[in-house]
Image: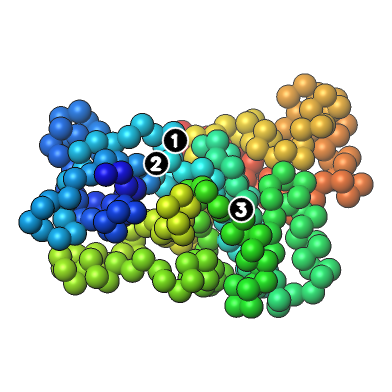
């Protein structure tokens, strides 16, 4: 039968199947010989062992439509990054780094701001204005009161989504709300096989239905922009694109050059000061990083 790997711990893979629920599986030796390692998110064919309930073997890994490096998972359709509108205050610099990292991996991203009930309309509009120009969907929700959760459910429907966000933003509350409180706990697995006690360091997939999965990424607090030259950074800011042929110098990086259209638009308020300041900071980091090597 077909299933999806929802967790991997110490060589054991937990596979969600619609027919038999969750099976604890080992991967057959042929995968090691082929140099293939099963990943969380893989669609697989499994066989249940007849004499052991809830135990099986992975006999085949189905073709992957995508594979992410960070986090190392397969078959993800999109990423959703969750921040709070307040308590804690959102780190837009961290958000920009996440958007860059996902764009490097060609993964569509949506941004969800939780605790929207704690701020006024003006604050929500200011945040929306910043990131709508970044060409990413922006949703405001309150998991506590169920506000906007229908829009989030529609965004997730029929897809495998990796969900990320710093601590304290209500990511677990959102996932619990989406799952109706019936989170696919690893407690039963841990009791049976005496493993999986420290699951916060492991990625895990939750099934909303047979075609909708949430991939819960361990919380992050900082992200380095990797494998990127400082001259390439401007290409990760969509709001800069229309200035490409309007700057005085070809290949303008919009930092110190004269007659820079990006900086002109910045002064006119057409480009977000928050986004530009983050761009300048990350650019400086990339420039300094290059000098060290």
Residue 19 position, x and y percent, is 30, 54
Residue pictured at 60% horizontal, 47% vertical: 109
Q: Secondary structure at mark 2?
A: loop
Mark 3 residue element: helix
The numbered dot on residue 155 is 3
Q: Give the labeled residue for mark 2.
A: 74
Q: Is residue 203 left or right of residue 107?
A: left
- The numbered mark, 3 or 2, whose residue comes first in the sequence reads 2
Residues at marks 1 and 3, CA–CA distance in whole angstroms: 19 Å
- Name the residue nearer the viewer: 146 or 133: 146
State the residue position of label 1. 66
Mark 2 and mark 1 in contact? Answer it, CB < 8 Å: yes
Nearer the viewer's eye, disc 3 or disc 2? 3
Residue placed most toward the observer, 98 or 154: 154
Quadrant location of residue 30?
Answer: top left
Dot 1 lies on which element? loop
The residues bearing labels 3 and 2 have C-alpha atoms spaced at a distance of 19 Å
Residue furthest left in the image? 51
Tell me residue 135's x, y (percent): 72, 44
User: How many other residues sit within 10 Å of disc 3, few (<14), some (14-19) or many (≥20)?
Assistant: some
Q: Residues within 10 Å of mark 2 (few under 14, many from 20)?
A: many
- 134 left or right of 23 in image: right
């Amino acid at each position: 039968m077909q299933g999806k790997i929802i967790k991997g711990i110490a060589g054991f893979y937990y596979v969600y199947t619609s027919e038999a629920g969750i099976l604890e599986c080992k991967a057959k030796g042929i995968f090691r010989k082929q140099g293939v390692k099963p990943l969380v998110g893989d669609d697989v064919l499994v066989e249940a062992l007849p004499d052991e309930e809830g135990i099986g073997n992975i006999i085949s890994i189905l073709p992957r439509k995508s594979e992410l490096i960070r986090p190392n998972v397969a078959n993800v359709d999109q990423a959703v990054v969750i921040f709070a509108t307040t308590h804690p205050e959102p780190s837009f610099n961290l958000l920009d780094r996440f958007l860059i990292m996902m764009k490097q991996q060609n993964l569509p991203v949506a941004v969800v701001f939780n605790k929207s009930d704690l701020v006024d309309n003006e604050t929500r509009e200011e945040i929306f204005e910043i990131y709508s120009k970044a060409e990413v969907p922006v949703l405001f929700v309150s998991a506590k009161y169920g506000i906007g959760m229908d829009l989030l459910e529609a965004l997730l429907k029929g897809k495998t989504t990796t969900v990320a966000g710093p601590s304290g933003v209500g990511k677990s509350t959102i996932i619990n709300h989406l799952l109706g409180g019936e989170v696919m706990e690893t407690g039963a697995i841990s009791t049976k096989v005496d493993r999986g006690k420290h699951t916060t360091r492991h990625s895990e997939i939750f099934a909303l239905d047979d075609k909708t999965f949430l991939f819960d990424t361990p919380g992050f607090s900082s992200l380095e922009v990797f494998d990127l030259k400082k001259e390439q950074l401007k290409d990760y800011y969509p709001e800069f694109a229309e200035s490409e042929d309007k700057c005085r110098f070809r290949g303008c990086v919009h930092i110190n050059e004269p007659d820079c259209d990006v900086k002109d638009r910045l002064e006119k308020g057409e480009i977000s000061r928050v986004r530009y300041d983050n761009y300048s900071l990350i650019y400086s980091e990339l420039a300094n990083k290059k000098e060290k090597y």
